[in-house]
Image (cartoon, grey):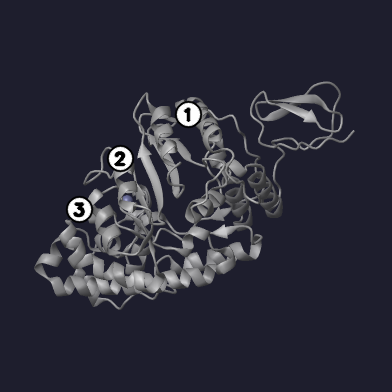
Amino acid sequence: MEFRLQRTNLRINDTVTDKRAGKVVGKRKTRRVVFLGKKHSVMTASAPIRSLPEACDYMLAQLRQHPDRDAVAAWEAAAAGRCRPYPVFGLGHLAAPTDTIPPPDDLVLPEVQMPATPEGDLAREVIGMLDPLKMLNPISASFGLGKGPGTLVTCFGIPLNPEAMDAPAYSKTIDQVLAEPPPDPAIAGLMSTMHARIDFIKARTPEAFKIGLPDTQGPFNLAHSTVGMEALTAPYEEEEKFRALMERITTFWLAALRNLRSWIGEARQMPHDRTGKICECSVNLVSPDFYRQHILPHDCRIATALGPLHIHPCSGPHVFHATLDNLPVIVTEAGFIARAAAGAISVDEALRALLDRPILLHVGQELPEGREYEFICADFDRYAANPRQLFGYTGMHWRRKDRPMIREIHRRLDAYWTQRYGSCSRPGT
Ligand SMILES: [Zn+2]
């Protein structure tokens, strides 16, 4: 008798049922399915992946089987102000370099048995897209680009330091940056590598796989990363020079984004990447007046070019308000972060400020030890009044060893949501 395993994300001790025979035929044990009774010809949970198309099929099948973890569907519902039947939220522990114990996971992804070629590596990346499922966190069929916040800093001739999590290796002076020719947005720094990667992904994977934009930061964050502390003092001492720097960076930023979008193409774009995003982390280090006078004009230029923006205020209440009050905003962020540079905007204050404007709020919070479940329930309760919200949490006191307990909290919160909002319209209904 031939038997194909329908659910390939089985947890340890989950049973395997032969649907046709209508009986339990096996149990998931460690990395393999252990079958009871007579042998079956099976595709086990850990059947290795041997080709890129196989990896893509497997990933997309998993995505279909987990509508409750579909990040893109959740984003689309939140952006449209539509109530969603699943919370689709992130819940995680602190990723600490000293926390090196093997994570106690009960989901084992199939091994990719392919050589270390570009195609083999892409297949491993595809299966890696399912990694968040180990923590019951949202997944999407999407590739990333670039090397984090430093990606565009490379275009100004500054290398990244892999030993410092790809932070810029050093900064330049404003004079140095202005003395050099403006970077070419087609080939400078990591741009040509990203272009080649986009072409490779498009040639080798089906269109269902999207390509996310790299972390492009924003003009002032880039200025701060490129020229260091001078970005904070030059506006007072050499205003004209600072403006010239910001203009050069903004011009480049817009051209780089335009190139990336056209290389990726409409069909491969992540829905949330259709909104221009500015990260304002460094604005936490300056006053609202400084922001309005020296940074806002450049952000406005971006809004004029791209339309309403996604703002990452990096927690700062004054950044949240200054951007919301002065720019067309369509997505913003709020939540409790303990060690923020200039305080943290609470979810209540943010929702009050949004009034009933159609703005998506990304709630990102650190959790109070021992009250994690209740704390998140309170956020979920606020969803009743405003469905334009997405949620993500980190337990700074949690480590890898806590994963089984974190998953348990996650399941309880999923159940809490189902009880409150489970009858909300499901995709396709
Ligand atoms: Zn930030």
* Disc sitting over residue 285 in the figure: 3
Q: Which residue is the site of mark 1?
A: 406
Disc 3 from disc 1: Cα separation: 34 Å
Looking at numbered disc 3 in the image, what kind of residue is underneath it? Answer: Leu
Residue 180: x %, y % from top left: 27, 76
* Residue 114: % across, % down: 66, 49
> How many residues crowd mark 3 within 10 Å: few (<14), some (14–19), many (20+)?
some
Q: Nearer the viewer, residue 339 or 353?
A: 353
* Residue 131, picture quadrant: top right
Counting residues from the N terminus, which is met first, the one under dot 3 or under dot 1? 3
Percent position (x, y) of residue 316?
A: 26, 49
Question: Which residue appears farthest toward the top when viewing the image?
Answer: 37
Q: Is residue 239 above or below residue 106?
A: below
Q: Is residue 41 left or right of residue 87?
A: right
Residue indicated by mark 2: 337
Rendered view: 204 above or below 51: below
